[in-house]
Amino acid sequence: MNKSDRLRIAIQKSGRLSEKSFDLLRGCGFEFDWRRNHLLCACTNFPLDLMLVRDDDIAEFVADGVCELGVVGFNMLEETLLGRGDKDREGIQILERLGFGGCRLSIAIPEDQAFDGPQSLDGKSIATSYPATLQNYLEENNIQAEVIHISGSVEIAPALQIADAICDLVSTGSTLRSNGLKEVQTILKSESVLIQTSKPFSEEKQNVISRLEQRLKGVMRAAKTKYIMMNAPKDALDKIKAIMPGLEEPSVIPLGANGEKIAIHAVAHEPDFWSTMEKLKEVGASSILVVPIEKIFG
Ligand code: PRT
Ligand code: ZN
């Protein structure tokens, strides 16, 4: 393969998304020639190079075609594209929502102040590291407020009287609480996404992306799926299927001489296996084993 046919993917070098981004790629079977403080890190068993950069630069690099793929928070993607005047996201394509790095971009005000809907922000000043996203929200909602761009520690702006309100990322809400603020309006919900450039690239690279995407889907599907085994009275089978609608074609094996008991083995998709196991026990299932699945393919 030509050197220029190696795919480039930008991920966060160090921060909240780094470990999960790495884990996902390692889960796909990619091994890396890891060198400390290098910007580029070659994959030794797949035509792929990692670009390790700040999260602020990822969407920019992908939109400019410096790399074909990137893993970035939707919040940062939106901010970058709006900042480039690309409201319709023409510069990139979202390939996958990755299910980690969940947070929301919200407006918060001092706890002791009243809020009667977004219009109460009229005439106020709002400090944020997301000026383009906030400006877009204000314009779409016809709110006349001043956007004050600050790059870090946004949550202390009201106490320092730099702004009346803030617009920042929230996950647990504890940063807001410990700064005497309350969340009053969510303007964007976010999670990490896999993005692809809209700039043209070779067919060879497109094939590599398709292979990478297929592996990624396999890893993500496996994360939500378990292999479940249990014993149960024969007449409980229908009740068990009703408890687990995500059960895929279970194998049912008669147990003992009279076949009154059965063993059930199946792949299952369940949001909460603990509560499912409790319900299974109630209908007579016993020896319930839930086993993780590493990969699902095909
Ligand atoms: O150095 P680099 O520029 O790469 O990293 P960074 O410091 O700018 O970003 P980083 O690592 O903090 O965040 C990277 C991405 O993680 C963000 O763009 C989001 O997509 C995602 N993410 C998820 C979060 C949070 N949750 C989050 N809680 N990013 C930041 N926060 C901060 C928030 O800004 C606030 O200060 O955490 C605080 C609030 O958290 P709670 O739990 O107290 O509500
Ligand atoms: Zn950053």
Image (cartoon, rainbow, N blue to C red):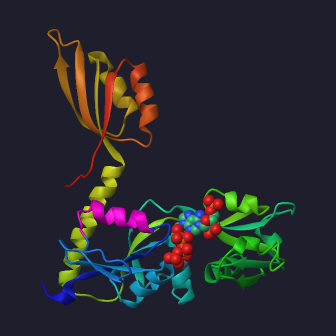
Q: Return the x and y of residue 237 as percentages of the image width and height.
A: 30, 23
225 sits left or right of 173 in the view:
left
Image quadrant for the N terminus? bottom left
Kindly identify the residue that appears in the image at 76 percent across and 72 percent down.
156
Prevailing secondary structure of the magenta residues? helix
Depth check: 56 or 95 in front? Answer: 56
Residue span colored magenta: 18-31
What residue is rendered at 31% in x and 31% in y? 289
Q: Residue furthest front?
A: 36
Q: Position of residue 77 (x, y in %)?
A: 50, 77
Name the residue nearer the viewer: 7 or 280.
Answer: 7
**Rendering coords of residue 225 (x, y %):** 33, 45
From this view, report whether residue 290 is shown above or below residue 259.
below
Whether residue 142 is visible here, answered yes or no, is no
Residue 34 lies in the magenta-colored region: no
Ligand 1 occupies quarter: bottom right
Q: Is residue 253 visible?
A: yes
Q: Is 24 covered by the magenta stretch? A: yes
Q: Position of residue 3 (x, y in %)?
A: 18, 88
Q: Quadrant of residue 13?
A: bottom left
Q: Is residue 130 above or below residue 297?
A: below
Comparing 9 with 18, the one in front is 18
Image quarter hosting the C terminus: bottom left
- Left or right of 110? Residue 76 is left
- Residue at horizontal 29%, vertical 89%? 200
Say if 24 sits above or below 146 in the image.
above
Residue at x 17%, y 71% (from the top left corner): 45
Q: How many marks?
A: 0
